């Protein structure tokens, strides 16, 4: 069956991509303006995390508060624009998909956003307080008085929360690649031990060097991978059925 992409030249593809990038940039600018007004209350909220309420935030450089403010503005802009980015990506590749694949993959956009928020929430409300308490207790046991810089605090916060938001995209990414026929559940099962090793390494980079913190990150990631394999099996079966129906319609 010939689709729209078959009739488009390389220049037309480039022009289509340029238009979609311009839409993304326009939405990002608008979202960043909104983020500029939301940054201050969000920064105040994040400063009031239960694990650091008794500590005073310090600015070691005059530019630190502005740096944090602009980083938060940029982050809010990216988060608000992410559904638009995903939709434009889907719209760019959707002409090359079957009708059933287009409907299925479009539903991945809200799922992706929700999973990202779930990853951020898990890391902020569960993992981050535990890591902060561990660090403060370690400092106390060594007789070190902890002074927290506002810039260092948010850098550490972003280092823990953002990767988890991205890692929680694993089920959607795997399902998307499965529906496109790039990977199969059999392949995911075959590379399981290598995937586990990669997730263990990622967990080691995110968490402090103690076994309990490492396990708190590793176990959810391994469960997430197994969920992804299970979802891939469902998506693979649906993709095979859709392919069979399409072949029957052509006969």
Image: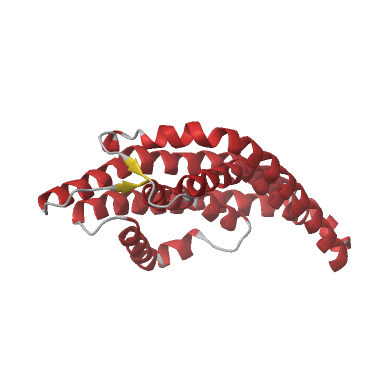
Tell me, yes or no, if residue 70 can be seen here. Answer: yes
Q: Is residue 128 above or below residue 142?
A: above
Question: How many marks can you see?
Answer: 0
**Which residue is rendered at x = 11% and y = 51% of the image?**
143
Question: Which of 163 and 250 lies nearest the eye of the viewer?
Answer: 163
In the figure, is residue 146 to the left or right of 157? left
In the figure, is residue 177 to the left or right of 97? left
- Residue 243 x, y percent position in the rendering: 68, 54
Q: Residue furthest front?
A: 62
- Figure colour scheme: secondary structure
- Residue 245 x, y percent position in the rendering: 71, 50
Question: Which of 29 and 12 lies nearest the eye of the viewer?
Answer: 29
In the figure, is residue 243 to the left or right of 120? right
Point out the image quarter for the C terminus. Answer: bottom right
Point out the image quarter for the N terminus. Answer: bottom right
Q: Is residue 132 above or below residue 9?
A: above
Which image quarter: residue 113? top right
- Residue 50 x, y percent position in the rendering: 29, 33
Which image quarter: residue 205? bottom left
- Residue 171 x, y percent position in the rendering: 49, 50
Tell me, yes or no, if residue 1 can be seen here. Answer: no
**Which residue is rendered at x = 45% and y = 62% of the image?**
188
């Amino acid at each position: 069956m010939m689709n729209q992409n078959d009739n488009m030249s390389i220049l037309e593809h480039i022009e289509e991509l340029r238009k979609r990038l311009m839409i993304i940039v326009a939405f990002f600018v608008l979202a960043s303006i909104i983020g500029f007004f939301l940054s201050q209350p969000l920064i105040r909220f994040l400063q009031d995390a239960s694990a650091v309420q008794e500590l005073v935030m310090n600015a070691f450089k005059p530019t630190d508060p502005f740096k944090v403010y602009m980083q938060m503005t940029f982050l809010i802009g990216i988060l608000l624009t992410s559904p638009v980015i995903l939709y434009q990506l889907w719209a760019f590749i959707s002409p090359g998909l079957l009708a059933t694949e287009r409907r299925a993959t479009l539903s991945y956009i809200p799922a992706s956003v929700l999973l990202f928020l779930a990853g951020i929430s898990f890391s902020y409300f569960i993992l981050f307080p535990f890591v902060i308490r561990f660090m403060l207790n370690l400092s106390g046991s060594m007789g070190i008085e902890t002074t927290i810089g506002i810039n260092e605090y948010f850098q550490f916060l972003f280092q823990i929360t953002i990767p988890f938001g991205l890692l929680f995209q694993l089920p959607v990414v795997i399902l998307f690649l499965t529906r496109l026929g790039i990977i199969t559940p059999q392949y995911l099962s075959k590379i399981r031990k290598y995937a586990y090793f990669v997730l263990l390494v990622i967990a080691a980079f995110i968490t402090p060097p103690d076994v309990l913190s490492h396990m708190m990150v590793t176990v959810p990631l391994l469960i997430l991978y197994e969920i992804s394999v299970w979802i891939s099996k469902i998506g693979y079966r649906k993709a095979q059925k859709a392919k069979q129906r399409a072949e029957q319609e052509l006969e």
